[in-house]
Image (spheres, rainbow, N blue to C red):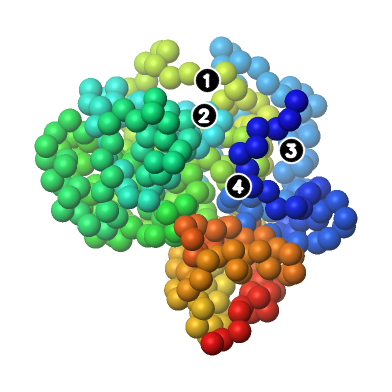
Amino acid sequence: MKLFDVYPLFDVNIVKGKGCKVWDDKGQEYLDLYGGHAVISIGHSHPHYISKVTEQLNKIGFYSNSVINKLQVELAERLGKISGYDDYQLFLINSGAEANENALKLASFKTGNTRVLSCEKAFHGRTSLAVEVTNNPKIVAPINDNHHVRFLPLNDLEPWVRELSKGGVAAVILECIQGVGGILMATPEFAQGLAYACKRYGAVLICDEIQCGYGRSGKFFAHQWLGIKPDIITVAKGIANGFPMGGVLISPEFEPVYGQLGTTFGGNHLACAAALATLDVFENEGLVENARVVGDYLMEGIRNIGSSHIKEVRGRGLMIGIELDMPHKMVRKPLIKHEHCFTGCAGQDILRLLPPLCLTKAEADDFIERLIRVQPEED
């Protein structure tokens, strides 16, 4: 059997990681400014994380959600406290797409409606409902295209209010910082107006914090920069530092019903141990504040390069987009091949930086030097 060939791959086999560095099977060290799609939040192979996951695995790795799992209770309490949402409820699953699937189902259950408003350039996942609210026709199969969704421009409130006023909207789903869309940020004025309109017209406001949340923006959630409080918050990626896990934070206005939602693997013992260890490191090492401080430092350093090929640097914390005046591959490929540094991308011309939240200023300086070396010569 061969692998189903859907991923274009760099010819690099990563076999080891530590902090913000990874190594290939030839012993070559790489600086990791991508964190595996923003998944590695506390750094690769953190000793506390390894210890706690190993300790749990030596006890029990999995049992079903038909019995009490006190690790789930502890995770809910810890997550509520650190995020400022201790009055919300937590439902645990395995991925970001599942988180958005369940969030949209809850919104439809609550409102009885089927329409959803989503952003132009949105990305919310690849499963049935999640991909339908993703603004990329190339990955929406005919079976997913059920005409539930209207895509509207970010930061242009009027069309959102107009659609909400028509009625029948179950949910508005919003990335407060769009990742795949190119590190585009919602403004406070837009977000607050949208939250007010959702309340006025009875729609559920879902903030997709799968990539921009969990400390990456320099606050625990990116929407906390905007002065809003969504009805539902979805999380994944950084929640367990690489162990597959996702979560839905649900307003107390939602009443749980037995059997309404369910999952086989979600919230298993090993996943909870990984998530709890991740929160330990967040708190002990001040990673949310580090993301803010080092992110500001890194963005300023990139701006100060003064290259005419860098059109704009934007983002919050350690979620950064570098818009170029050329295809991103002209910089991203030499960064990997010659400078041994991983970055991400968005669109055709944007480098996307999503490093572990433990990135240091020295590592930020190191990246800037590598970025300077791969800049094409000025015309």
Cα distance, mark 2 to mark 4? 17 Å
Q: Quadrant of residue 30?
A: bottom right
Is residue 25 depicted above or below 79 in this figure? below
Looking at marks 1 and 2 on the same chain, the residue that comes earlier in the sequence is marked by 2
The percent position of residue 246, horizontal first and vertical second, equals: 53, 35
Looking at marks 2 and 4 on the same chain, the residue that comes earlier in the sequence is marked by 4
- Report the side of 67 relative to 20 (left or right): left
Cα distance, mark 1 to mark 3? 24 Å
- Report the side of 155 relative to 218 (left or right): left
**Circle 2 residue:** 92
Cα distance, mark 4 to mark 3? 18 Å
Cα distance, mark 1 to mark 2? 8 Å
Residues at circles 4 and 1 in contact by the CB criterion of under 8 Å: no
Q: Nearer the viewer, mark 1 or mark 2?
A: 1
- Tag 2: amino acid: Leu
Element carrying mark 1: loop
- Tag 3: amino acid: Lys
Element carrying mark 4: loop
The percent position of residue 304, horizontal first and vertical second, equals: 53, 83
- Tag 4: amino acid: Val
Crowding around mark 4 (Cα neighbors within 10 Å: few <14, some 14 to 19, many 20+) is: many
Which quadrant is home to the N terminus?
top right
Cα distance, mark 2 to mark 3? 19 Å
Looking at marks 4 and 1 on the same chain, the residue that comes earlier in the sequence is marked by 4
